[in-house]
Image (cartoon, helix red, strand yellow):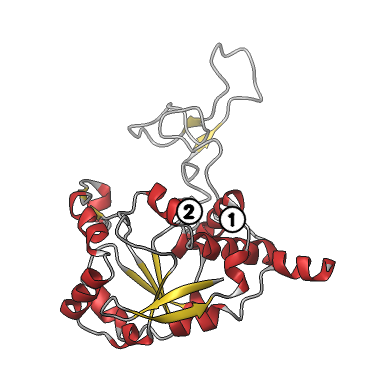
């Protein structure tokens, strides 16, 4: 299976043999499962102070009976404002929570290594499907072949103005312009917590060395860069929806070629 190798000017430099990873069957269910599990690794645990609502001087009327009053614990004290009110239990005003969240709750979802590896191989293979890329919403009608493979010159680009010219050459500008209308502004808590704007996802560059290219992509919304050794399902399928418009450098393809798909290993073993 071969794919055209493009220069940064958009011209065809030749062809490159795609690794066997791109022959992995596309498993949308497995990609979704891997994304959900990996996303939980970034969650922050939350809990409550164990004595919240319990640091009160309240005693129950449960031992004696015949007082014609509920046996709920009542506030004691020297004539305070809450004297006689219920306290220290879950059903009263300003009482504790019945079942508060605890920090000991297990929220880190584990995933089998082979499942995670197969999901990654499946997501990489899906980037070669122009149909899936367009179904996600990317504007890729002018792109002739998938996956997009660019020469290693792309890794030396460090300025946004130079990268914009490359976008025009590779017919990616239309997809990046799509995000200008998708900029969503928030108010309230998200704004206070540094999430005042929400931007969609455009092209993902997979390279061997992201030192220079990450500087050029930093000011362009929706454009991300990741090194091949750190590639994850979360990069290739944001929101667990396959698949993202992806461009690889020649060196990144060689790096991905070292990845062995569990499905292909099984097929080789059966032969």
Q: Between 50 and 114, which is closer to the camera in this rendering?
A: 114
Q: Between 122 and 97, which is closer to the camera in this rendering?
A: 122
Residue highlighted by disc 2: 242
Name the spot of residue 196 as percent of width and height, x first.
Answer: 22, 54
Residue highlighted by disc 1: 26
Q: Quadrant of the N terminus?
A: bottom right
**Crowd rating for badge 2 (residues with CA inside 10 Å; few <14, some 14–19, many 20+):** many
Task: Say which quarter of the image contains residue 245.
Answer: bottom left
Residue 16 as seen in the image, left or right of residue 82: right
User: Residue at point 26% right, 48% down?
Assistant: 189
Cα separation between marks 2 and 1: 9 Å
Can residue 188 be seen at all in this image of the molecule?
yes
| Eye-nearest disc, 2 or 1 | 1
Name the spot of residue 8 as percent of width and height, x first.
Answer: 29, 80
Q: Looking at the rendered structure, which numbered label has been put on residue 17?
A: none
Q: Between 186 and 236, which is closer to the camera in this rendering?
A: 236
Residue 175 as seen in the image, left or right of residue 236: left
Task: Say which quarter of the image contains residue 226.
Answer: bottom left
Q: Are marks 2 and 1 in contact (CB under 8 Å)?
A: yes
User: Residue at point 66% right, 25% down?
Assistant: 63
């Amino acid at each position: 299976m071969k794919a055209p190798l493009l220069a940064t000017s958009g011209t065809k430099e030749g062809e490159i043999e795609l690794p066997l990873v791109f022959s992995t069957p596309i498993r949308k269910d497995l990609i979704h499962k891997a994304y959900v599990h990996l996303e939980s690794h970034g969650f922050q645990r939350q809990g409550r102070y164990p004595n919240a609502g319990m640091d009160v001087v309240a005693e129950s009327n449960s031992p004696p009976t015949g007082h014609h009053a509920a046996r709920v614990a009542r506030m004691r004290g020297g004539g305070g404002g809450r004297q006689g009110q219920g306290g220290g239990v879950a059903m009263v005003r300003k009482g504790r929570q019945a079942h508060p969240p605890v920090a000991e709750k297990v929220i880190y979802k584990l995933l089998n290594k082979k499942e995670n590896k197969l999901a990654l191989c499946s997501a990489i293979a899906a980037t070669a499907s122009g149909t899936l890329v367009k179904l996600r919403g990317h504007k890729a009608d002018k792109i002739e072949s998938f996956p997009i493979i660019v020469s290693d010159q792309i890794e030396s680009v460090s300025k946004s103005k130079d990268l914009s010219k490359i976008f025009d050459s590779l017919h990616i500008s239309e997809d990046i312009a799509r995000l200008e209308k998708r900029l969503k502004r928030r108010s309230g808590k998200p704004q206070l917590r540094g999430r005042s704007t929400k931007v969609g996802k455009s092209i993902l560059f997979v390279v061997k060395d992201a030192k220079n290219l990450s500087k050029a992509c930093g000011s362009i919304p929706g454009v991300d860069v990741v090194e091949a050794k750190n590639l994850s399902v979360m990069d290739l399928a944001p929101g667990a929806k396959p698949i993202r418009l992806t461009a690889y450098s020649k060196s990144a393809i060689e790096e991905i070629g070292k990845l062995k798909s569990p499905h292909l290993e099984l097929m080789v073993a059966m032969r």
